[in-house]
Image (tube, rainbow, N blue to C red):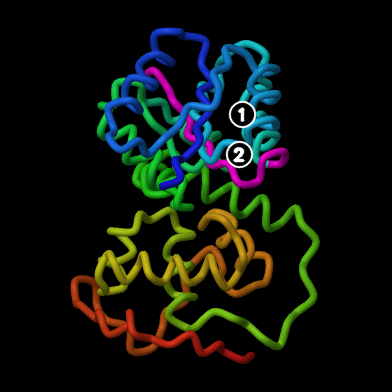
Amino acid sequence: MDTIPILIVDDAPLFRHGVRAAVAEEVPAEFTVVGEAADGTRALELAITHEPSVILLNAAVEGLDGFEVIRTLKRRVPGAAVIVVADREDEETLFYAITYGASAYLLKSAGADDLRDVMRRVARGEYLINDRVLSTPLVAARVLESFRDLAHDVEPEVEDLYMPLSPREIDVLGVVAQGNSNKEVATILGISDQTVKNHITSIMRKLAVNDRTHAVVYALRHGWITDTPRARRGAAAPGARQDSDAAEGDTAAVR
């Protein structure tokens, strides 16, 4: 079985040793540490050379230009998922982590099982940072404001006659754009958490984006959603369950 290559970027040798120890506990091995870096220059060199699937990144290490390094790493190594590691919960760090495209945000106090689970999931393409950010009210408000700014700063796209998202997917994306977590979206639309996840996965696939931040920006730019989610006729009241939505087909709506 192929192992998942990971790169550790942190100026604390003890932390890097701890990650190696956590990786070594798995039998058979799931992960391989392909490199360690204590500064930004070395991190970029190792990332380009080894093309890791996962990069554990302390964005405060010497030689890194703040969170801009995440964008640089993802541009130079497109297949890498970046996990931002931090000493403590910090709303500012959370905000910039999602803004610059991190896949997850992890505290250094996390246990080995949690670390391995996060690395495993981001390597599969999951964006775990979204729920964490959007469940933090102040960060959610800033992210929403960024959505609006990004949509306004970019030239409007040519209006398409074909809109690939279904009406229910537009509903879901509109509620996400208000800064709601998956659980809150489920409650507002009267569907299950899993149905929300299924819709978001489908939305990202159809729009060819990597996370729901960019899905919201894309939809705002095209005028499919506004700052206030549109009311859908026949939508269930909050608390009602309409899991039949999960079976809704991918039939695209035509303007």
Question: Residue at (43%, 43%) from the top-left corner?
Answer: 129
**In the picture, residue 113 is in which quadrant?**
top left
Local secondary structure at mark 1: loop
Relative to residue 38, is residue 133 depicted above or below?
below
Q: Is residue 222 above or below residue 141?
A: below
- The x, y position of residue 103, in whole percent, is 49, 43
**231 relative to 234, above or below:** above
Residue at left 36%, top 26%? Answer: 107
85 falls in the magenta region: yes
**Left or right of 105, for residue 253:** right
- 10 Å neighbourhood of mark 1: few (<14), some, or many (≥20)? many
C-alpha span from label 1 to label 2? 6 Å
At which x and y percent is residue 19?
Answer: 38, 22
Q: Nearer the viewer, residue 80 or 145?
A: 80
Residue 175 x %, y %:
42, 65
Please say if the residues under marks 1 and 2 sit with CB atoms less than 8 Å apart: yes
> Any mark on residue 100, and which?
2
User: As drawn, is 51 to the left or to the right of 233?
Assistant: right
User: Which amino acid does the dot numbered 1 rest on?
Assistant: Phe
Residue 234 lies in magenta, yes or no? no
Mark nearer the N terminus (1 vs 2): 1
Q: Write down the region rendered in magenta.
A: 75-88
